[in-house]
Amino acid sequence: MKNAYQLKYFGKVQGVGFRFTVKKIADKYNIVGWVRNVPDGTVEAFAQGEELSLESFIRAVDLYFHDNIQELRQIEDVVSDYVGFQIRY
């Protein structure tokens, strides 16, 4: 079953290769959606995939950036028709 989440990362998440690494991890776990920097210094993402893959993706991002992420807000969202994972500017 597919799930989707809106994710908002707080902490030192801009200027550290966060978006590019999130995309790489998303591709590894077959996650579709997007990631972008927000002017307030946070990073937002929409991530969608099979439940176990999505959980693994979120955990992998957290492990990779454990020193940078101070908080993650995760809200369940509606499954969409995205293809691939994009970095938005």
Image (tube, rainbow, N blue to C red):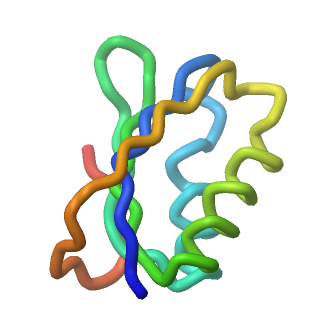
Q: Quadrant of the N terminus?
A: bottom left
Q: Is residue 55 left or right of residue 80?
A: right
Q: Quadrant of the C terminus?
A: top left
Place of residue 69 in the rendered image (x, y in percent of width and height, measured from the top left) = 68, 27
State whether residue 27 appears in this view: yes
Residue occupying image coordinates x 38% and y 81%: 2
Place of residue 76 in the rendered image (x, y in percent of width and height, measured from the top left) = 35, 52
The residue most toward the left is 81
The mark total stands at 0
Q: Which of 10/20 is in front?
A: 10
30 up-or-down from 56: above or below: below
Residue occupying image coordinates x 52% and y 64%: 23
Q: Is residue 44 left or right of residue 55?
A: left
Q: Is residue 35 left or right of residue 66?
A: left
Residue occupying image coordinates x 62% and y 43%: 17
Residue occupying image coordinates x 55% and y 55%: 20
Place of residue 9 in the rendered image (x, y in percent of width and height, measured from the top left) = 52, 31
Query: Which of the 4 quarters of the picture holds residue 49?
Result: bottom left
State whether residue 86 appears in this view: no
The residue most toward the top is 40
Q: Is residue 71 left or right of residue 82?
A: right
45 up-or-down from 28: above or below: above
Query: Which of the 4 quarters of the picture holds residue 22?
Result: bottom right
